[in-house]
Amino acid sequence: MSGAQAQAFLALWNGIASAQVQTEYESWHTFEHVPERVGLPGFVEATRYRSVDQPLRYFTCYSLRTLDALGTPEYRDVFTHPTPWSARMRLVLRDFYRLPCEVGGVQGLGSASQLATVQWRSASPGLAAQLNRWLEALVWGGGAVRAEWGVAPPGEDYWLPNTANSLQGAGQDHVLMLQHLDAQVLRRSVQALLAFLQPQVSCVAPPEYFERLTHVRQDGLDSPPGQRRAPHTFLFDQFNGK
């Protein structure tokens, strides 16, 4: 995520119905859906990941200038008027969960192929400063290439209905994205993170591990910024025998 431009992000987890739809899902998500979203006002970039433990599970992070990007008429339009391919692919999504967050902290200068996501709930006002210090030390010591976390504002849905259950417990939802080039080092760092978090938060979800698939930036698209991209009818027709 580009820290100079992005003050928020949209974290999104989902599965798909079966391996039989995976090739079509991957093509739709790569060539139509994510570029369409990234082209909208207030979006900066997006990175797609696939789980290393559950082959039909995915994570996508959309970098946003602010959370206002999720309240624009353009975003509402793509959400409520999907393309024919998007309407078809919505039927194969499973365990869908979105979490819009304001950035709470970023450590590290680069990025890496291995990602872990950790979610928790907390009402502790002092946790942010402690967490940022802990993550700074983790990155400095080689335990992560990049660490980024955010907190979801209370009472905001941003046109984002979820089908998966959110965390239980008091406080606000948080998510942290931890990156490393070595999967085993990443898992050890996550275990250390959980040991740091658990005495201070009300609930921690099991971490999930992913590998990076694709990355797209708004300034790299071939359409005007802020304008909805045309649907990818060529690939849609191929998959639907037209």
Image: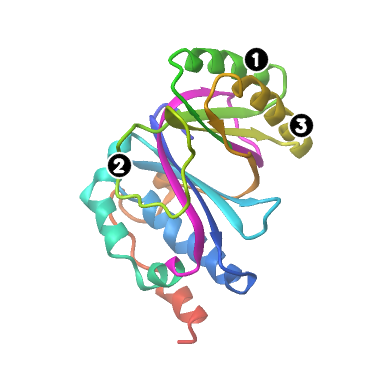
Q: Residues within 10 Å of mark 1 (few under 14, many from 20)?
A: some
Question: From this viewpoint, which residue is outermost toward the bottom?
Answer: 242
Question: From this viewpoint, which residue is outermost toward the right?
Answer: 184
| Viewer-closest of 101 and 126 | 126
Magenta-drawn segment: 90-117
Percent x, y of residue 62: 44, 44
Q: Quadrant of residue 80?
A: bottom left
Q: CA distance from mark 2 to mark 1?
A: 32 Å
Residue type, numbered disc 3: Val
Percent x, y of residue 180: 68, 34
Q: Earlier in the sequence, mark 2 or mark 3?
A: 2
The structure residue drawn at horizontal position 71% and vertical position 33%, both measured from the top left corner, is: 186
Is residue 6 visible in the rendered structure shown here?
A: no
Q: Which element is circle 2 on?
A: helix
Q: How many marks?
A: 3
Residue type, numbered disc 2: Ala
Q: Is residue 94 magenta?
A: yes
Question: Circle 3 is placed at which residue position?
Answer: 185
Q: Earlier in the sequence, mark 2 or mark 1?
A: 2
Percent x, y of residue 131: 55, 18
Q: Residues within 10 Å of mark 3 (few under 14, many from 20)?
A: some
Q: Which element is circle 3 on?
A: helix
